[in-house]
Image: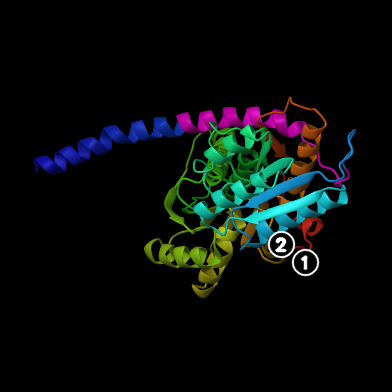
Amino acid sequence: MKTKTFKNNLKKYLFPILVLLLIFNLTSCAEQLNNSDASTNSSEEFDGAIESEIDLTGKKIGYCSPTLNAPYYQALWQSIKTTTENNGMQFLSADGQDDITKQIAAVEDLITKGVDALLLNPKDPDALVGVTKIAKAAGIPVFIIDSSINPKADYITTIQANNLANGALAGEWLAKKFGKKQMNIALLSGNAGNPVGRTRKQGLLQGITEEQLRTQGKINLNVKTQAYTEWSYAGGLKAMEDILVAHPDINVVITESDVCVLGAIKAIAQAGKTDDILIVAGADGQKEAIKYIMETDFYGCTAMNSPVQIGKNAVKYAVEYMNGKRDFDKKSYTAPLLITKENAAEYYNPNAIF
């Protein structure tokens, strides 16, 4: 009897503490969003032709990907290669093969080859700090692209989509769509501890709660479960199968990436629930997701994380550094963009890699 009373008291006092923590985190997230907007407004999107006061002939751009075993990474690799070579430079690349030890060795190899700038997409935010310091000692500027790295690393800037702002746009759209109707949310994430996924998730939750507060004066954030997909079709399929068994009342799926949910769609369809569940993605604008948005009602929206534009921007910033620029912001964003049924056709390219 005492144990039951203790548990009841624990719930009674812990619940308001958890609510306060949630509000604190979302307030912090809102401040980050406001700060990120300033950088976003100054971001440039261009066609890949770079002005340079120095002769770029013979300059080497090195790029190391965490893996090339996914359309997004292939599209990013192709964008960097094309932009580099179209501006008269030499492109050197290395594949981390989804293994942090191999990625470290691959980066060290690019440094040994004497690249003039190193573009790095880290598999792990901490494990690659050491190689950035080796690059700096060799006089090679490092540009972090797509993902993030520990601030202790030596790098010039991070070039990525505005994951917080994109997530907030998607969350706001969802809250407007549902209004006062009860949302029973399943969250599909990439993998535990990923900084980009965490930021997208923060954006989604902030977008939902801010819109609810604005229109209803209260928060009704009912996330019933979270599952990790390892950023894969198969992972999304398995996660959604398990969720539908454990939580048959789910009517919303929010996700950190299109790839996390594309496999989940199969599980939803097999369960006959495409009319009962709405999907909202905080990123990426993958062509398969955009097609679903155009042709169905169950995939509501996604946000643009363009590997093509990120690749172009990364090479541009590397060339600017070679030309003497040093006053880079630590974070450089592409412009946030929400893709819905109203504008999906404008961004759909069936021939795109991603």
Q: Extreme bottom residue here?
A: 270
Q: Residue furthest left?
A: 1
The rendered magenta stretch, by its main secondary structure, is classed as: helix
Q: Residue, x 68% and y 36% (percent of image)?
A: 140
Within 10 Å of disc 2 (Cα), the crowding (few <14, some 14-19, many 20+) is some
Which residue has dot 2 on it? 287
Q: The C terminus appears in which quarter of the rendering?
A: bottom right
Q: Are marks 1 and 2 in contact (CB under 8 Å)?
A: yes
Residue 235 position, x and y percent, is 49, 64
Q: Say which mark, if any, is on residue 323.
A: none
- Residue 338's spot in the image, x, y percent? 70, 47
Q: Is residue 298 magenta?
A: no
Q: Which residue is mark 1?
A: 350
Q: Which residues are drawn in magenta?
A: 24-49
Q: Secondary structure at mark 1?
A: loop
Residue closest to the eye, 111 or 15: 111
Left or right: 264 in relation to 58:
left
Q: What amino acid is found at the position of numbered circle 2 in the picture?
A: Lys
Residue 34, percent from left and from top: 64, 28
The amino acid at mark 1 is Pro
